[in-house]
Image (spheres, rainbow, N blue to C red):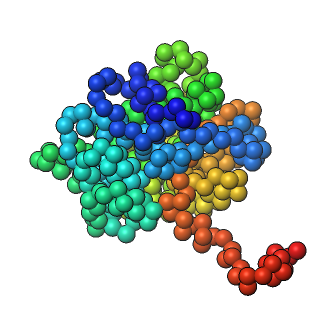
Amino acid sequence: MGSWKGIIEHYRSRLEMDDDSPVVSLGEGNTPMIFSERLSERTGLEVYLKFEGMNPTGSFKDRGMTVAITKAVARGAKAVVCASTGNTSASAAAYSAKAGILCVVLIPAGNVASGKLAQALVHGAKVVEVRGNFDQAFEITLKLEGPYPIVVVNSTNPHRLLGQKTGAFEVCDGLGRAPDYHIIPVGNAGNITSYWRGYREYHADGVTQNLPQMFGFQAAGAAPIVLGHPVDQPKTIATAIRIGHPASWDNALAAAKDSGGEIRAVTDKKILEAYRLIASEGIFAELASSAPVAGLLQLAADGRVAKGKTAVCICTGHGLKDPSWAISGAPKPVQVDAQMDVVAQALGF
Ligand SMILES: *Cc1c(COP(=O)(O)O)cnc(C)c1O
């Protein structure tokens, strides 16, 4: 949409903005909510995929980052820092570049998808690989903020969560109501927290008359909330949710409990199946983004969701960030001579 100017301009009155601070935006938000014929047919529900991979840096992180960087700049910050499994750093790097400030990124060495690392580098972030996992990198980030003039833009930054609730507004604006079921991947649990805030805010203000049940899905090898204890060595192919000590743990539990939903787990095998399933319908979302789709199929198989209801799965990031899983699971293209008849023969015509 040519007139779309990003989530701050569109939802300004709901984002606690000072009118005079310059907005740092790359036109985030307004992402498509795509009706899924296949998932609807398989589950008996009306299923939509909100494709957050269509944000400027390819993930929902941009919704929070536009607010966090706008507020940081308004406070005179010259540098920001984040720990990241990839998408937070990609987003922080891009919005910092737009604002003309320094971005420092701490990533777990060897565990970030190449596309995400490329994004941080191309936007000029100072990238430090930490020999450890996300949780350890994040701990260091928090310690840096006190003694050094640098603002943390992880989801513990309240402005991130403020911006991310606009996802819920868009879902409701698109459907004309809140969905019956909201299904979302859970890593650090900031996003489920934000969505639940957004849905409640619209409901409290009378914009919507209903609230969704909130279902969050962790990967089985990185499911601290489901297990009820932290996981020191989280394991999953869905790197964006490979988190063993979620920052917003209590909020995620509250969202599930207060809405009549649940936090559940799905195996990597089911995540990969879901990844291929939505790809077969034209949507290339990253592995973590496929967890809610695997989750929806699990809920339907368990009879936990009622037919005829509306479900929205949040597909949080774009598949192009980590194409290795797409390529490894597909047949190798055949190679032939550059002749029409040879090509036709190879196609079986
Ligand atoms: C950050 C991220 C998540 C996890 O979101 P939380 O707010 O940490 O729960 C899921 N999917 C993708 C693609 C992400 O980038």
Q: Residue furthest top?
A: 206
Residue at image coords 51%, 33%: 4
Residue at image coords 49%, 50%: 58
* 75 to the left or right of 329: left
Tell me how many marks there are. Answer: 0
Residue at image coords 25%, 47%: 101
Residue at image coords 45%, 26%: 11
Q: Residue furthest bottom?
A: 337
Q: Quadrant of the N terminus?
A: top right
Residue 248 position within the rendered picture, expressed as x and y whole percent measured from the top left? 37, 41
Q: Residue furthest left?
A: 147
Q: Nearer the viewer, residue 231 or 86?
A: 86
Asked if 15 appears above or below 331 in the picture, the reply is: above
Residue 293 position within the rendered picture, expressed as x and y whole percent measured from the top left? 62, 49
* 287 to the left or right of 90: right
Q: Quadrant of residue 326?
A: bottom right
Q: Quadrant of residue 273?
A: bottom right
Q: Does any portion of residue 16 appear in the rendered image?
A: yes
Residue 237 position within the rendered picture, expressed as x and y whole percent measured from the top left? 50, 63
Residue 62 position within the rendered picture, expressed as x and y whole percent measured from the top left? 42, 43
Asked if 320 appears above or below 27 in the picture, the reply is: below
Asked if 337 appears above or below 61 in the picture, the reply is: below
Q: Quadrant of the C terminus?
A: bottom right
* 246 to the left or right of 53: left
Q: Nearer the viewer, residue 2 or 179?
A: 2
Q: Does any portion of residue 224 appear in the rendered image?
A: no
Q: Quadrant of residue 37?
A: top right
Q: Nearer the viewer, residue 318 or 131?
A: 318
